[in-house]
Amino acid sequence: MSSQPIPVLRSAGAAYSFLYAHWRRFLLAAAPFTLAYAVQLWLAQKALGAPLSGFWLTLDATAMIALTVGSLAFSAMSFRLAVRGEYAGQWGLRLGGDEWRLFVVALLNAALVLIVALLTAMFAFVVFSTIAGGAIEQAGIDPEAAGVDLPTAMSYMSTADWVAAWVVNGIAFLLVAWLVARLSMSFPASFAQQAVRVLSVWTLSEGQAWRILGAMALAALPLMLVQIGLYELVCLALDARPLMTPVTVGDEVMTSGGFARAPEYLRVTGLFSVINLPVMAGLYAQFYKVRSAETA
């Protein structure tokens, strides 16, 4: 294992260079699952008017299967090209050992991140509830006797209370982000070694989590801002939001604000997976090449 630190700027540059060098291949390989994704989005909008049934449910299920298989094959093609320089199969796509290993690694990573995210969310919620309860008591109200619920208690929170709550939430988010960074080597390592690698390559990212997060932000944020900006321009031109679906939060149905915008913007970035997935594959591959290189 190399002791060389991960270069933030150079890693992000390598990711974009990888996309530029093979963009024609990515356009062809992404066509099947991008079409399936577009059909899925169209059916989601169609379902807003009336529940899907019969032929439309069959089409929805078919599109979902095609999307799942196509995205897995495209992601594997991107990693295969980035890590091993290998381009095989029709348009680089195939279903074999690499694809199944990627599927298993993604599941294991998702399970680990989900467990940590749930634990940190529970901790943050307990701390937030304690802060809100303290704000009620400082106002001279007995929360149990008055039967005050959490939303009401929040209205009594001071600026200092909110700052403390956001600090706790920020720490919880950074912990999950740190774990995602530490697990990033598992994807390219599984392709380089042609075996499932998760915790066995944990040491490759040791001491590099914040550099990895910096490179990920530098590579991903410009893409997200451009893609969301283009989508907002389309929305202005159409005077409508074609990818918006209502989000139910408690008893309210929301069509604006963060709860509705976040999933809407995720759909936007999903449509641009032909760009986003290769960039991240190239970025992760660069991390692995730097950290797995033998020291001179």
Image: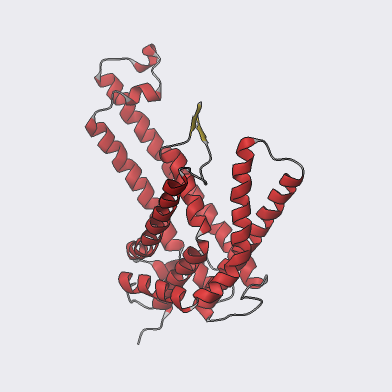
Residue 155's quadrant in the figure?
top left
Number of callouts: 0
Question: Residue most toward the top?
Answer: 145
Q: Relative to residue 89, is residue 124 depicted above or below? A: above
Quadrant holding the N terminus:
bottom left
Q: Is residue 41 above or below residue 143?
A: below
Residue 197: x %, y % from top left: 54, 68
Give the side of residue 172 with respect to residue 270, left or right: left
Q: Within the image, what quadrant is residue 207 found in? A: bottom left
Q: Residue at x 37, y 30 (%)?
A: 129
* Residue 134 vertical placement versus 147 (above, below): below
| Residue nearest the viewer, comparing 190 with 20 | 20
Residue 185 appearing in the image: no
Residue farthest left in this picture = 160
Residue 100 seen in the figure? yes
Pick the residue in front: 27 or 160: 27
Q: Residue furthest bottom?
A: 296
User: In this orientation, which residue lies closer to the viewer: 51 or 233?
Assistant: 233
Report x, y in % for residue 289. 43, 77
Residue that extends furthest to the right in the rendered view of this protein = 54
Q: Is residue 218 above or below residue 51?
A: below
- By what rule are the colours in the image chosen? secondary structure
Percent of width and height locating residue 262: 45, 45
Across and down, in percent, residue 48 comes to: 60, 37
Report the quarter where the C terminus lies: bottom left
Residue at image position (50%, 74%) is 23
The residue positioned 51% from the left and 51% from the top of the image is 267
